[in-house]
Image (cartoon, grey):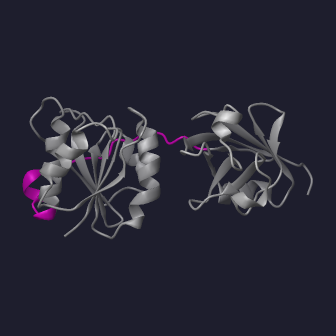
Amino acid sequence: MPVVTVTSDWNKHDFYAGVLEGGLLGIAPVYQITHQIHPFDVRMGVFVLRQAYNRYPSGSIHILAVQAQATDQLPMSVAYYQEHYFITVNDGRFSLLFDHEPQWIRAVYAAQGTFSELDAYIKAVKAIVEDKLGEMTLPADMKTEVRPSAVAEKDYIMGQVIYIDSYGNAITNVSRSLFNKVGAGRDFRIFLQGPYNRIEKISDSYGGVRPGQLLALFNSADLLELAVFMGSLATLENIGLYDDIQIQFSKYG
């Protein structure tokens, strides 16, 4: 039996997760990735699910329940990608979630109404588990949305903070491969919120600096992460979601 994960902005105090889990009782076991996505922040939900889904076994079913009110034009849909099923609204977020086209997408039509997406989630999971997707869904094309990407020139990279974790660490959209390609071993400075707050080395771990000191490292997703050891970068340096960061490389080796 496949497992079901849920990533949502429902908040742990709300009853929506309980309604969904009750509806799936006996159909498939349900695991929470998080219900703490910021309200309506689809990009945050996509980022969290991108980092987590491949830790689950092949055949797992992943529900992304963030601002997922389905309509006839933007129906709830099931996408199959890298041997995993994904259920959410087909409004462009699949193109942010996946690096390549999914093997297929199928639309799930359910009765319209308040929180009708809960019924659509249950209907879609049941169709997958019972191998009835062909009977209960219709083929669909993937809507697309432009993914924010870092901008690179010969001597600099302009990136963006795409996630701030519960410790106040800022994860950016600058990948290790892009950093190495542009930097080519040169000295560099990472600027935060102007010319005065800067980082000039990549640490191997959080423990390589003094408490309260700024640091940069590449995390398990190979994305550049900025932090304050034993502190909150977001609070101390007033760094916010989607803020820009600049990496300036020396013009010489």
User: Where, quadrant-wise, is the N terminus in this rendering?
Assistant: bottom left
On the picture, is 189 further left or further right than 216? right
Residue drawn at (75%, 54%), measured in percent from left and top? Answer: 182
On the picture, is 230 further left or further right than 86? right
Whole-percent x and y of residue 216? 72, 52
Compared to residue 218, the image places residue 237 above or below, namely above
Residue drawn at (40%, 42%), measured in percent from left and top? Answer: 36
Q: Nearer the viewer, residue 115 or 185?
A: 115
Q: What stretch of residues is rendered in magenta?
A: 129-149
On the picture, is 178 further left or further right than 138? right
- Asked if residue 135 lies in the magenta stretch, the reply is yes
In the image as oriented, which residue stretches furthest toward the right?
A: 252
Q: Nearer the viewer, residue 148 or 169?
A: 169
Residue drawn at (76%, 50%), measured in percent from left and top? Answer: 211
On the question of residue 138 being in view, the answer is: no
Whole-percent x and y of residue 80? 29, 59
Whole-percent x and y of residue 92? 37, 40
On the question of residue 226 being in view, the answer is: yes
Compared to residue 236, the image places residue 53 above or below, namely below
- Asked if residue 175 lies in the magenta stretch, the reply is no
Q: Nearer the viewer, residue 142 or 148?
A: 148
Residue drawn at (79%, 56%), measured in percent from left and top? Answer: 209
Whole-percent x and y of residue 245? 70, 38
Of helix, strand and loop, which mostly describes the magenta segment?
Answer: loop
User: Where, quadrant-wise, is the C terminus in this rendering?
Assistant: bottom right
